[in-house]
Amino acid sequence: MKLLDGKICAASLVADISKKVAGYVGSGLRKPHMTVILVGEHAPSESYVKSKIKSCESAGFESSLLRFPESITEPDLLAKIAGINGDPSTDGLIVQLPLPKHIDPQNIINAIDPEKDIDGFHPTNFGRMTLGQKAFRPATAYGICKLLQFYEIPVKGKHCVVIGRSNIVGKPISIMLSNDFEIGNATVTLAHIETPRQLLLDETRRADIIVVAVGIPGFITEDMVKEGVVMIDVGINRLENGRIVGDVDFERVAPKCSWITPVPGGVGRMTVAALIVNTLMAYQNNFDLA
Ligand code: NAD
């Protein structure tokens, strides 16, 4: 069993980008700029935002964190987004989810300029991604693709099983792995909460690659997988003792895997790295750089 190490892969991607940025800045351009909006107080969001800002520093980007109180109204938040959409000094905009209950996240996502939508959640980018066109691809799914590429894991012709159909992870990764794109050309099964248990087991037991994003600790057990499977664990679950674990019973499943992502230090790191890749793309688009 070998680890698909998100820390190593993310650091390598960010280091390459920082060299490019140094070149752009050396030629007189401003730095790429990511703006993050954080509404209210939510401990996991604080930590995700912190790591995004830290990665911006490592990449040589500028970053801005705009904090708004839990009580901000949807119209007021939409007005803030409109302001950033119109501000040429910001290349990429993230609105950290989840949002307070009185704000509809879809209205917020739809309001972000698709050219600044580095999370890749806007319907325009999701549509372009689905059609195999140039797009900001949803960051977690894109990060998984980058990780598979970095470790030269064969995907073409493989049987992938994706478990979980969220718009941010399961759905986009199932599309990306099946598309004829940078990495893909796999045969993909998308399982979800309505998938009958026996059908799920039949699929996972013959899968070459499993991507699991359900948010249930220990969901993938040893008896669900074949020897040599590549396991991508997207889950981030905080146990009562404070430990962070994924959706895979790592201790028992890992010995059967050819490759597996650790949690933490796997997909989470790649999500942030993909945001950096997307921000660079937004910046390059703005300045007509290759
Ligand atoms: P979600 O929480 O919105 O939905 C869970 C999905 O799991 C649903 O599509 C549901 O159909 C499926 N599911 C639930 N129980 C199931 C079952 N018994 N059998 C089959 N499918 C089942 O999904 P999400 O937002 O993608 O989050 C999933 C996990 O991934 C969470 O732990 C979340 O914290 C984590 N996550 C991690 C990252 C990262 O960067 N590593 C990014 C996003 C989400």
Image (cartoon, helix red, strand yellow):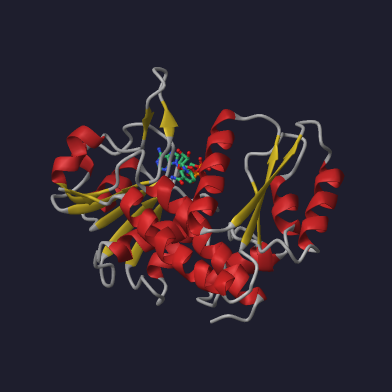
User: Is residue 257 in sight in this rendering?
Assistant: yes
Query: Residue 173, percent across and down?
Result: 44, 59
Residue nearest the observer in this picture, 99 or 13: 13
Residue 282 higher or lower than 163, as above or below: below
Residue at the image point whose x is 81% and y is 31% from the top: 71
- State the residue at coordinates (54%, 47%): 52
On screen, 235 above or below 203? above
Q: Please tell me how many numbered marks the rendered image carries.
A: 0
Viewer-proximal residue, 57 or 169?
A: 57
Q: Residue furthest top?
A: 241
78 displayed left or right of 23: right
x, y (%) of residue 211?
A: 35, 51
User: Residue 36 at x, y = what percent?
Assistant: 66, 48
Quarter of the image for residue 193 reads top left
Quarter-of-image position of residue 136 = bottom right
Is the residue 10 above or below the residue 128 in the image? above
Residue 170 visible here: no
Q: Residue at x 70, y 61 (%)?
A: 90
Position of residue 240 relative to residue 286, above or below, is above
Residue 155 location, x and y as percent? 28, 67
> Viewer-proximal residue, 289 or 25?
25
Which residue sits at x=20%, y=33%?
251
